[in-house]
């Protein structure tokens, strides 16, 4: 029969293409409308941000602070009301268009969801911007002077938080974002900072004289060491000077002591005659050495003589400061190389101004010095009465052999009565005169050579 033309077969295909083109046109128009809405919302947001006035930061504690916050909240509420009115008008126009177009399709539902999200985002963004402004304002209002009491800071912070809370309640927003409190110093941090400031101030503060000394400071200020006063420097210099003088005196004493033990008594007498102060210096150093001993030999000799009759006449060879004469009731002849007391007779102990056999007791207390000890003992034998008493006390370290010493003394006309070797610092001997010396003057007595008592440098 008749063949159908080609356009008849292609007619349904063309109809299908028409419906497809209509659907594409609708989607294109909806996308264009969505883009216009986004652009409109962006311009509205830019206008709102630009219209907010920049106010200078107010000082904390001012009286007009609360009034400024109330005016600012009113302005924001009016702006939000205008924005809400404009958005309601746009919403009514959209509803009318939807009624004309018919039932909403799936594309229109997606557009509605996107529109709601954009609306919420705009409101949330405005709220975040306002919250950020408040935070900056609080940071500017933090006082620069840290010495302000913390109670006033707490009060201002509570006022700011109360005002922000009331403004947030009056806002017609969809969501209320959580805001963090501003960073403030704790009480402990504030105290530590104040303590460091006080330390820096007191570091360069000059010390006050004792007459104008302030009241006792607190425990925190007591930790700061005060600057050394000039009085302390003067006392330190005086102590150093005294110590150096003491060392010098010790050196001179050691020199004089060595001269006395290494030469005859005549040379020692000439030394003290040329320098009278040298004997005073030597005697002071000698007393400093002897006072460290547990028992001084002069006290031991005085105790023994007190047990004897007071009528006995005593001769003290090397008396020093006449301590023995002051300790007993007997009559005492005091002899020494120099005088420290009016009772002292200055002479060489090898030649004392006494008559033969005129005394009852002869005493040598730490005075067998020099190289002519034999001359001293022979002079004592000359002035002692027959049966007279000779008492000798000498440093224990000077004796190499006590027996040889005692043997040499007996050859000079004496007899050993007693000896005390128990003391750690000195030995004590008692002799009785038996007669004149039994040896000639040229006879050598090696037992009478004692070691010199030399003091070490300490």
Image (spheres, rainbow, N blue to C red):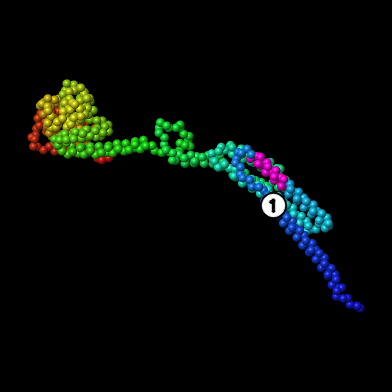
Q: Position of residue 442 (x, y in %)?
A: 8, 37
Residue 392 visible from this viewpoint: no
- Choose between 345 and 118: the one closer to the eye: 118
Q: Main secondary structure of the magenta part?
A: helix
Residue that appears at 23% across and 30% down: 297
Q: Position of residue 212 (x, y in %)?
A: 42, 32
Image quadrant containing the N terminus: bottom right
Judged left or right of residue 12, residue 87 is left
Judged left or right of residue 417, residue 211 is right
- Residue picked out by circle 1: 47
User: Based on the displayed image, in which of its 4 quarters is residue 367 positioned?
Assistant: top left
Considering only vertical position in the picture, is 344 above or below 172?
above
User: Based on the displayed image, in which of its 4 quarters is residue 437 positioned?
Assistant: top left
User: Based on the displayed image, in which of its 4 quarters is residue 115 positioned?
Assistant: bottom right
Q: Residue furthest bottom?
A: 1
Magenta stretch in the rendered image: 65-80
Image quadrant containing the C terminus: top left
Considering only vertical position in the picture, is 361 above or below 148?
above
Q: Is residue 413 magenta?
A: no
């Amino acid at each position: 029969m008749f063949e159908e033309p080609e356009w008849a077969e292609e007619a349904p295909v063309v109809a299908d293409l028409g419906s497809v083109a209509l659907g594409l046109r609708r989607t294109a128009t909806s996308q264009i409308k969505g883009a216009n809405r986004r652009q409109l919302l962006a311009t509205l947001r830019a206008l709102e941000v630009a219209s907010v006035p920049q106010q200078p930061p107010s000082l904390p504690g001012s009286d007009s602070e609360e009034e400024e916050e109330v005016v600012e909240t009113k302005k924001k509420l009016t702006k939000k009301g205008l924005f809400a009115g404009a958005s309601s008008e746009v919403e009514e126009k959209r509803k009318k268009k939807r009624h004309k177009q018919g039932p909403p399709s799936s594309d229109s539902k997606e557009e509605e969801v996107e529109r709601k999200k954009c609306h919420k985002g705009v409101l949330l963004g405005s709220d975040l911007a306002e919250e950020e402004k408040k935070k900056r304002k609080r940071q500017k209002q933090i006082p620069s002077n840290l010495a302000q009491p913390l109670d006033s800071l707490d009060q201002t912070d509570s006022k700011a938080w109360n005002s922000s809370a009331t403004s947030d309640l009056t806002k017609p927003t969809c969501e209320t974002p959580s805001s963090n409190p501003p960073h403030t110093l704790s009480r402990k941090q504030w105290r530590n900072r104040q303590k460091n400031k006080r330390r820096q101030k007191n570091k360069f503060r000059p010390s006050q004289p004792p007459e104008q000394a302030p009241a006792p400071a607190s425990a925190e200020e007591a930790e700061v060491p005060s600057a050394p006063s000039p009085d302390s420097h003067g006392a330190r210099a005086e102590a150093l000077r005294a110590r150096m003088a003491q060392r010098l005196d010790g050196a001179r004493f050691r020199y004089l002591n060595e001269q006395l033990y290494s030469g005859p008594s005549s040379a020692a007498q000439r030394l003290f005659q040329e320098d009278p102060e040298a004997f005073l210096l030597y005697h002071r150093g000698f007393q400093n050495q002897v006072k460290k001993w547990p028992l001084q030999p002069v006290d031991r000799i005085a105790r023994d003589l007190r047990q004897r009759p007071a009528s006995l006449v005593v001769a003290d060879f090397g008396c020093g400061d006449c301590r023995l004469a002051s300790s007993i009731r007997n009559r005492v002849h005091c002899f020494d190389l120099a005088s420290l007391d009016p009772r002292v007779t200055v002479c060489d102990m090898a030649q004392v101004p006494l008559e033969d056999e005129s005394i009852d007791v002869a005493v040598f207390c730490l005075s067998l010095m020099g190289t002519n000890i034999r001359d001293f003992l022979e002079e004592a034998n000359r002035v002692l009465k027959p049966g007279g008493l000779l008492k000798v006390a000498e440093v224990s370290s000077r004796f190499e052999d006590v027996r040889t010493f005692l043997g040499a003394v007996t050859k000079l006309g004496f007899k050993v009565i007693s000896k005390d070797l128990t003391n750690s610092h000195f030995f004590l001997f008692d002799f009785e005169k038996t007669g004149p010396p039994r040896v000639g003057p040229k006879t050598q007595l090696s037992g009478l050579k004692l070691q010199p008592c030399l003091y070490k440098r300490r």
